[in-house]
Image (cartoon, helix red, strand yellow):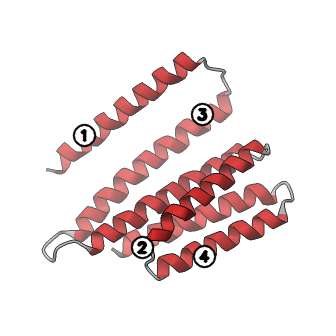
């Protein structure tokens, strides 16, 4: 459970600092202060175990990332901030479910498996987004729909494979 807590705060720090750096890079100091404040408030909510705060925190971070993309800020920082916020949202819910685990459950094993899967999905997401930013190829809607289908199929196969390997 300590590992989950560490990952949770690490991802929160990554979300707040990635978004804040993206806005700082173009000189929007008011937004930087707001984003650091959001991160501090979210950290306070995590310490108090207010799991309900993760949804508004996630949507606020997502809105900040979307606004940053709309304003033409660096897409890498906005993507990193949104992805880290998604990880915080997921880990907050996972930590809440771990607190409800029965006494005989292997909490450390569950946390290890969840963190492994989450790390793998985040790594694939970062890699695909980085490739997309580097290549900057224009796709048609049909091609994008096909890529989404293939990615969803591939991820479901990977998760199924990992689940079968854990049994």
**Residue 115, position in %: x, y?**
36, 59
Q: Which mark is residue 41?
A: 4
Of the two numbered discs 1 and 2 on the same chain, state the one appearing first in sequence. Answer: 2
Of the two numbered discs 2 and 4 on the same chain, state the one appearing first in sequence. Answer: 2
Asked whether the beta carbons under mark 1 and mark 4 sit within 8 Å of each other, the answer is no
Asked whether the beta carbons under mark 1 and mark 2 sit within 8 Å of each other, the answer is no
> Which residue is denoted by mark 2 in the rendering?
5
> Which residue is denoted by mark 1 in the rendering?
160
Q: Left of 32 or right of it: where is 82?
A: left
Of the two numbered discs 1 and 4 on the same chain, state the one appearing first in sequence. Answer: 4
Q: 63 or 46: which is nearer to us?
A: 63
Q: Which mark is residue 22?
A: none
Residue farthest toward the bottom in the current orientation of the protein: 48
**Residue 98, position in %: x, y?**
28, 70
Q: CA distance from mark 4 to mark 3?
A: 33 Å
**Residue 42, position in %: x, y?**
56, 72
Secondary structure under badge 1?
helix
Q: CA distance from mark 1 to mark 4?
A: 37 Å
């Amino acid at each position: 459970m300590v590992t989950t807590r560490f990952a949770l705060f690490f991802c929160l720090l990554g979300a707040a600092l990635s978004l804040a750096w993206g806005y700082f890079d173009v000189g929007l100091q008011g937004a930087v202060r707001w984003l650091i404040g959001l991160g501090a408030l979210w950290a306070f909510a995590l310490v108090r175990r207010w799991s309900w705060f993760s949804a508004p925190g996630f949507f606020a971070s997502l809105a900040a990332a979307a606004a940053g993309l709309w304003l033409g800020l660096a897409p890498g920082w906005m993507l990193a901030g949104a992805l880290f916020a998604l990880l915080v949202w997921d880990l907050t819910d996972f930590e809440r479910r771990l607190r409800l685990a029965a006494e005989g459950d292997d909490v450390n094993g569950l946390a290890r498996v969840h963190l492994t899967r989450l790390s793998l999905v985040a790594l694939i997401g970062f890699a695909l987004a980085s490739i997309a930013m580097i290549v900057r190829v224009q796709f048609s809607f049909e091609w994008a729909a096909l890529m989404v289908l293939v990615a969803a199929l591939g991820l479901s196969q990977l998760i199924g494979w990992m689940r079968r390997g854990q049994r």
